[in-house]
Image: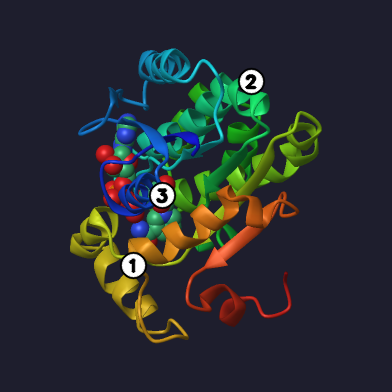
Amino acid sequence: MGIYAMTGGATGIGAAVKEQLRAGGNTVIVVDIKDADIIADLSTEAGRQSAIDGIRAAAAEGLDGFIPCAGLGPNVNPYSLISKVNYFAVVATVEGVKDLIAKKRGALVLISSNSASMPGMNENYIDLLLAGDEAGASSLIDTLDGHSAYAGSKCALTRWMRRNTAAYAAEGIRMNAVAPGFTQTPLTEKVMADETLGAVIKEFNESIPVGRSGQPVDIANVICFMLSPASSFVCGSVFFVDGGHDAMLRPDQF
Ligand code: NAD
C-alpha cells in the first residue's frame, strides 16, 4: 500500500480523493486549513512552509503521490487570495516535496479547471504568476475580477505543469492535471449563492452535454487512476472531466 500527501482534503473533491485512497488501504497525509492532519493556511508563506515541514516529517521515506487540491473559487475577495492558494501554494508545496516523490518514482496530480482554457484571460496576470511574482500578480489581480483571478490561476498552473513535465519525468515523477467542470462541492455552493456569479453559472450548468453537473467522486475516480500504475505512460496530460463542456466549447482544440 502507498503513502500519499494532499492539500485540501477536508471537503469536496479532496475529501473524495482522501476517502478513495484510504479505502484502498493507503496512508494519506492531509493538509488543510481545517479538519486535517496538518493544519496550515496555504495563502501564507509560513503556512506553506509548515505544510512542507509536516509532510516531510510524516513521509521521510518518500511519497507515492502528491495531490495539491486546496483551492478557492472565483467568488473570493480579495482576488489575490485566489492566486495565492490556487497557484503560488501549489507550486511551493510541489517543489517542497518533489524529492520525496522522486524517491518512490511517484505521481503528481494537479487540479486545473475547464475554465483554464476559456476566453477572457489576462495574459499579464498569467505571466506574473508564471514568473513567480506574487506581489506583482496580487497588485494586478486585485484591480480585476474573480473570473480572471480563478481561470487565470488555473491556466497558469496548467502551463506550469506542461512546462515542467519533462524535467519532472527525468527525475522519475509523472505529473498530470485533471480539469474538472462544474462539480457540486462547498466551493460551488458559495459560487451559486453569489449575487453576480450565481445566475451565469446556473445557465452555464444547464448546457453541460451529459445533462448533469459533476460529483466529487467523478473527479476522484480520474485522479486515482492518474495516481495508479494503470496510467504509467500518461504524463503531462490535462484530463477534462467536465461532462463534455470543453469539447462543446472548443471542438477543434485538443
Ligand atoms: P472545496 O471548497 O470543497 O475544497 C477546497 C479545500 O481547500 C477545502 O478543504 C478548504 O478548506 C481548502 N482550503 C481553502 N483555502 C485554504 C487555505 N488557505 N489553506 C489550506 N486549505 C485551504 O472545493 P472543491 O470544489 O472540492 O475544490 C477542490 C479543487 O478543485 C480546487 O482546487 C478547485 O479550484 C478545483 N476545481 C473545482 C471545481 C468545482 O466545480 N468544484 C471545478 C474545477 C476545479
Q: Which coloring applies here?
A: rainbow
Q: Are marks 2 and 1 in contact (CB under 8 Å)?
A: no
Q: In the shown orientation, is residue 125 left or right of residue 23?
A: right
Q: Which residue is mark 2?
A: 99
Residue at mark 2 to residue at mark 1: CA–CA distance: 33 Å
Task: Please name the residue that numbered disc 1 is placed on.
Answer: 215
Give residue 24's mark. Answer: 3
**Marking on residue 17:** none
Q: Residues within 10 Å of mark 3 (few under 14, many from 20)?
A: few
Residue ID at (50%, 37%): 2
The label nearer to you, 2 versus 3, is: 3
Tell me: residue 154, above or below residue 115. Answer: above
In the rendered image, the quadrant that contains the C terminus is: bottom right
Amino acid on which disc 3 is placed: Gly
Question: Could you say which is closer to the camera, residue 249 or residue 242?
Answer: 242
Instruction: Give, as a three-letter code, the residue at label 2.
Output: Asp
Secondary element under disc 3, as helix, strand or loop, is: loop
- Amino acid type at circle 1 is Gln
Answer with the quarter of the image where residue 81 lies. top left
**Discs 2, 3 touching: Cβ within 8 Å:** no
| Residue 135, image x, y percentages | 49, 22
Residue 77 visible somewhere in the drawing: no
Q: Earlier in the sequence, mark 2 or mark 1?
A: 2
